[in-house]
Image: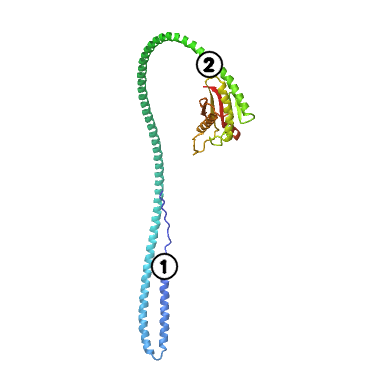
Amino acid sequence: MMNIRYRTSTNPWPGFVDLFSNLVIILIFLMIVFVFLWTTTSVFNKTNGAQTVAQLRATNAEQAQTIEQMSLDEIEAKRLLILARHQLEDLEQSNTELNNELNDLDLSVTELITAYEAKVLELQSQGNDLQKTIADLNTQLNQAKLDKEKTAALELERKQLQDEMETQRLNLVEQLAKLQTALDAAEEKSRVQEIQYVEMSTRLNRALADKVAELKDMSQYQSEFYKAVKIAMGDRTTIQTDGDRFIVNSDILFPSGSYKLSNDGKKQLHLIANVIKDMEEKIPTDINWIIRVDGHTDKKQVISGTAGYKNNTELSLLRATAVANELAAAGVSPRRLVPSGFGDMHPVELGNDSAALQKNRRIELQLTNR
């Protein structure tokens, strides 16, 4: 909003005129005193008295003329100053009237600006309402378009499904016909196979009976094998039995992170090798038996850059292979030894403490049939 304000200033001209008049009067008085003093001094000069009097008279005449001219100038200056004062008063009056008119105009402009701002706010409000209405209409239009597109898509999908169902029905009829043909052939084949089944069942029962007898014999030799290992190992606590197998702690056989057998580990394996060699002589040749050598590790991951293996599974297989090779070197038939590595996939302890990790680092040996 435009705001116009005027401030009426004080008029300095009347004071200036009075000051100028006083200065002119003082100047004239000082000149008269000066002339009087100078004339008096010259008159009493004996040498130049007459000449001085004549000069004084001429000077007085000039000064009188000058004073007269100055008086006329003063009068004219007063007249001009009075005229200027009147003109200033007229200008002040005009300025006052102009200020009044400007104040009235300022008030009118203020009212117009206020009315304009109110109208702008009203139009802005109407514009916002129109924009909201347009947005709602656009939303409705877009929704209508989407509904139309969805309807068209659903109709197309319905037609596709109907065509697919008709195709599947025809395929099903064709498959049923093929199945019926196959069923007739299967019934004939079943009749023939039923005769063969009776014959195979008889042979299978005979083979199962032989296998059960073999397993009974194997169980007898397993018990004898574990008993012989316990006797051979004496009071050593590094080997423990667990069901149908015995477990050797890897920390006794191998240094940490290595698959090279230690000297103490080789000695213990030689004791076990002697027991296995005795079992080779006792178990009949018609029983196909083996010694499984299973390697296991803890769940600590292999250090990056380790030479020889990439993970725990490879380390466990290398250790199991080293045990099998040492047993073979001690005289056990290599065909009876089957090494395998399981890494950390089959822990016997689930804890994270050092004792649990140590139990999981192990070599398991099991006498079983192939």
Q: Residues within 10 Å of mark 1 (few under 14, many from 20)?
A: few
Give how far across and how far down residue 88 sits, in percent: 38, 62
Q: Do we see residue 350 in this rendering?
A: no
Q: Is residue 340 left or right of residue 30?
A: right
Give the vertical position of 141 relative to 72 (above or below): above
* Camera-side residue of 331 and 186: 331
Kindly identify which residue carries mark 1.
Answer: 16
Q: Do we see residue 38 in this rendering?
A: yes
In the picture, the disc for residue 211 is: 2
Q: Is residue 152 left or right of residue 277?
A: left
At x 41%, y 71%, the residue is 21
Task: Looking at this view, name the residue that lies furthest to the right.
Answer: 235
Residue type (three-letter) at the residue carrying disc 2: Lys
Q: Residues within 10 Å of mark 2 (few under 14, many from 20)?
A: few
Give how far across and how far down residue 323 sits, in percent: 54, 31
Say which element carries label 1.
helix
Say which element carries label 2.
helix
* Camera-side residue of 202 and 360: 202
Q: Earlier in the sequence, mark 2 or mark 1?
A: 1
Which of the 4 quarters of the picture holds residue 151?
Answer: top left
Disc tally is: 2
Residue type (three-letter) at the residue carrying disc 1: Phe
At x 39%, y 34%, the residue is 135
Give the vertical position of 65 relative to 294 (above or below): below
Which of the 4 quarters of the picture holds residue 86?
Answer: bottom left
Mark-to-mark CA distance, 2 and 1: 147 Å
* Camera-side residue of 301 and 327: 327
Which of discs 2 and 1 lies nearer the camera? The answer is: 2
Asked which colour scheme the image uses, the reply is rainbow
